[in-house]
Amino acid sequence: MKPGLKTKSARILLPAAFWLAVWCLAAACVDQPLLVPSPIAVLRRLGELAAAPLFWRSALVSLLRIFCGALAGTIFGTLCAVLTCRFHLADWILTPAIRLVRATPVASFIILVLLWVSTGKVPGVISALMVLPVVWESVSAGIRTTDPQLLELAKAYQFGSYKTMRYVYLPALKPHFAAGVCTAIGLAWKSGVAAEVLCLPKAAIGTQVYYSKIYLETPSLFAWTAVVIVLSMLLERVVRRLLGVKGGRSA
């Protein structure tokens, strides 16, 4: 095994083993499964949940719902960034609204949106609202920091709008856009699951988390929480791979 691979494996396995040991110790000291279930009990319950069709349906529906919301937020965030950087009137009108969205607590938005749309659509709308300001800020920064000398060169060579966008703006925007989306996707997932907990759509991870808490099924609560964490990591990894991001930087 190469030294670099050994170091990478150690950085993953050692913290995992340490916190697993802390969990086992806490469960043994408390000795109350209702408060702190053991890792074995949680793993057993996770296996039971995975054997039921509801588990996979809830996970798939939550992923699809939140991903679609994040995609919509990314599209609208990019469009708003282009408009606010290109037109002063759009900047005056849209920028305060986007900053207001960024400053508003997620719980407040969930309750407000719940009044306006059906419960099944709330997580997607919330995910879009949380993604939009992050992508807008990242893309705006990329547009404003585009090298002016390259723009002058494109103008001198009489590049049209398409060529200027492709050869000047897109290379400058790529790292900003990728960083913004990678940051926003985790925020979209957490806020989307939180919206599910509050609005309780029929098939959703957040709904199962809420029911586990209501019925004091602590192993189920831990198991569903583990599912949320794992899916969040997988979703972020997929997005990073699609955007060509490695080690937190765009390739």
Image (spheres, rainbow, N blue to C red):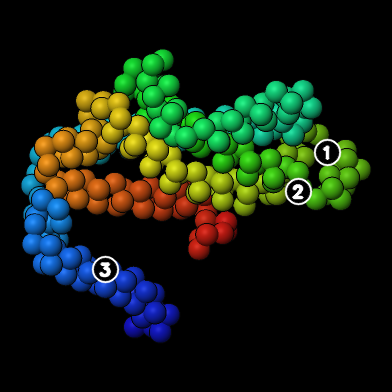
Q: Residue at x 22, y 36 (%)?
A: 210
Q: In which quarter of the image is the C terminus?
A: bottom right
Residue 33, by quadrant, is bottom left
Disc 2/disc 1 C-alpha distance (Å): 19 Å
Circle 3 residue = 19
Identify residue for label 1.
Answer: 159
Residue 170 in view (yes/no) = no
- Which numbered disc flags the more N-terminal residue, 1 or 3? 3
Residue 176 spot, x, y in % from top left: 63, 49
Question: Which element type, helix, strand or loop, lies under badge 3?
Answer: helix
Residue 158 visible in image: yes
Please report whichever mark, 2 or 3, sits nearer to the chain's N-terminal start: 3
Q: Which residue matches tag 2? A: 145
Q: Do the residues labelled 1 and 3 touch (CB within 8 Å)?
A: no
Q: Distance between the residues labelled 2 and 3?
A: 42 Å
Residue 212, given in percent of the width and then of the height, sits at 16, 40
Tell me the quarter of the image containing the N terminus: bottom left
